[in-house]
Amino acid sequence: MNGDLDHIHLLIECTPQQYIPDIMKALKGVSARILMKEYGIIIKKKLWGGHLWNPSYFVATASGNTEE
């Protein structure tokens, strides 16, 4: 995991049977609930439209050879 001011990068291992949109929905949903519970007052002042995460995401695949 790493990131910048307005985005994060995650390297996630999953099987071909796992549905990427479900993984993203779970990651964004759970992290938003945790962050809002802990820092909701601070975060809500900076949000536009009340959403913590943008609904879009980018996915690329990597093998063990290209992981680095």
Image (cartoon, rainbow, N blue to C red):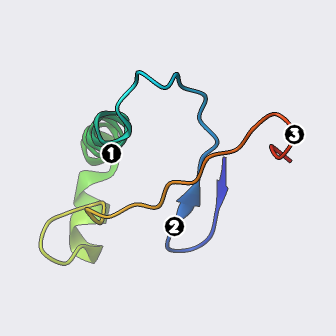
Disc sitting over residue 28 in the figure: 1
Residue 14 picture location, percent across and down: 54, 25
Indicate the amino acid at tag 2. His
Disc sitting over residue 7 in the figure: 2
Across the whole image, how many numbered discs are drawn on residues? 3
Q: Earlier in the sequence, mark 3 or mark 1?
A: 1
Residue 38, by quadrant, is top left
Q: Earlier in the sequence, mark 3 or mark 2?
A: 2
Q: Secondary structure at mark 1?
A: helix
Q: Residue at x 36, y 42 (%)?
A: 24
How packed is label 3: few (under 14 Cα within 10 Å), some, or many (20 or more)?
few
Q: Nearer the viewer, residue 27 or 37?
A: 27
Q: Residue at x 37, y 34 (%)?
A: 23
Q: Does the residue at mark 3 contact the one at mark 1 (Cβ under 8 Å)?
A: no
- Answer above or below: position of 59 versus 28: below
Disc sitting over residue 65 in the figure: 3
Indicate the amino acid at tag 1. Lys
Q: Nearer the viewer, residue 14 or 36?
A: 14
Indicate the amino acid at tag 3. Asn
Left or right of 55? Residue 58 is: right
How packed is label 2: few (under 14 Cα within 10 Å), some, or many (20 or more)?
few
Residue 3 picture location, percent across and down: 63, 62
How packed is label 1: few (under 14 Cα within 10 Å), some, or many (20 or more)?
some
Q: CA distance from mark 3 to mark 2?
A: 25 Å
- Answer above or below: position of 60 versus 54: above
Q: Residue at x 14, y 66 (%)?
A: 50
